[in-house]
Image: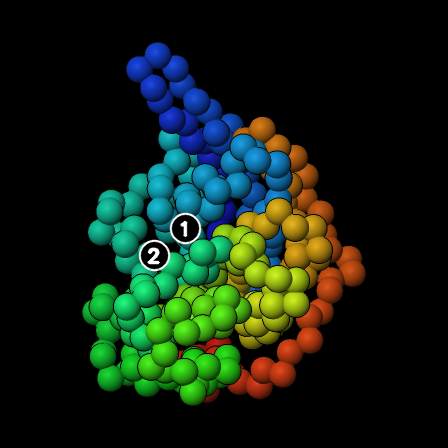
Amino acid sequence: MLLQVKGLTKSYYSEVEEFKILKGIDFEIEEGDFLSIMGPSGSGKSTLMHILGALDKPTKGRYYLNDHSVDSMDDAALSKIRNQEIGFVFQAFHLIPQNTVLENVLLPSHYGQNDEVSIETAKKLLQAIGLGERLNFRPSQLSGGQCQRVAIARSLLNNPSIIMADEPTGNLDSKTGNDIMAILQYLNRQGKTIIMVTHEHDIAQHTKQVMFLKDGLVDRFEKVTDQVQAETNLNFSLKDIFGTSN
């Protein structure tokens, strides 16, 4: 099992009160899954995503990634997990405005990587997703969809096991959002495990299963029986880029 969560809780505290956000979450994700997380505002989606992404720690409970107990790791180990095992794609892209496209994709490479290898990998990734001619552009010179493609390339640079996407289509029109989902589906078919938060039911239908949260608990799981397949003209292999399939 790639990822396991057992009895996960998360609370925040004021001087007089405890605010319980997650109240005992249990679930498992197998390698190669494509899971979307849905739920109303305040249900705990973002909090759960932060914990799964090793950006925050649970108050109680266990979180295992590749049989390693992430919840008990120190900050240095969590940083390594974030850099090597998990790639992030955010609604707001989080690109550095003054950096070029290539420089933005290279941001994860500072953590003990070979610079020449990382540059070559970044160029291959950008070429693969259709931005090979825009290596020296700035984010302000790109469309929203192109910015999200840069973010996807950045998330892949260190060949992580999991891509975590937090509302990746939230700032995009429906056609561009479908283009982004086509890329994520393409990556999933090549073996990447993807966990995605979304509030859009039509976007969730591009995934393999949906986990619904309500009031800090798992309300239900639903298999997507008629998965929407977004059309794409992508034609690249992660094995060719990294020398391995995932």
**Callout 2 environment at 10 Å: few (<14), some (14 to 19), or many (20+)?**
some
Residue 67 lies, with reference to residue 116, above or below; the image says above
Percent of width and height locating residue 178: 64, 66
In the picture, residue 140 is in which quadrant? bottom left
Question: Residue at the front extreme?
Answer: 141
- Whether residue 17 appears in this view of the structure is yes
Q: Residue placed at 34% from the left, 19% from the top?
A: 14
Residue 82: which numbered mark, if any?
Answer: 2
- Secondary element at image label 2: helix
Residue type indicated by callout 2: Arg
Real-space CA distance between mark 1 and mark 2, rounded to the nearest whole angstrom: 7 Å
Judge by depth and name the residue closer to the eye, 140 or 212: 140
115 vs 85, left or right, is left
Percent of width and height locating residue 174: 66, 62
Q: Which circle's residue, 1 or 2, is located before the other in the chain?
A: 1
Percent of width and height locating residue 232: 64, 78
Question: Residue at the top extreme?
Answer: 16
Percent of width and height locating residue 172: 57, 61
Q: Residue placed at 22% from the left, 51% from the top?
A: 76
Q: Residue placed at 60% from the left, 54% from the top?
A: 35
Residue type indicated by callout 1: Gly
Colour scheme of this structure image? rainbow
In the picture, residue 33 is in which quadrant? bottom right
102 vs 177, left or right, is left
Circles 1 and 2: CB atoms closer than 8 Å = yes
Q: Residue under circle 1?
A: 53
Q: Residue placed at 35% from the left, 73% from the top?
A: 138
- Whether residue 164 appears in this view of the structure is no
Residue 61 lies, with reference to residue 237, above or below; the image says above
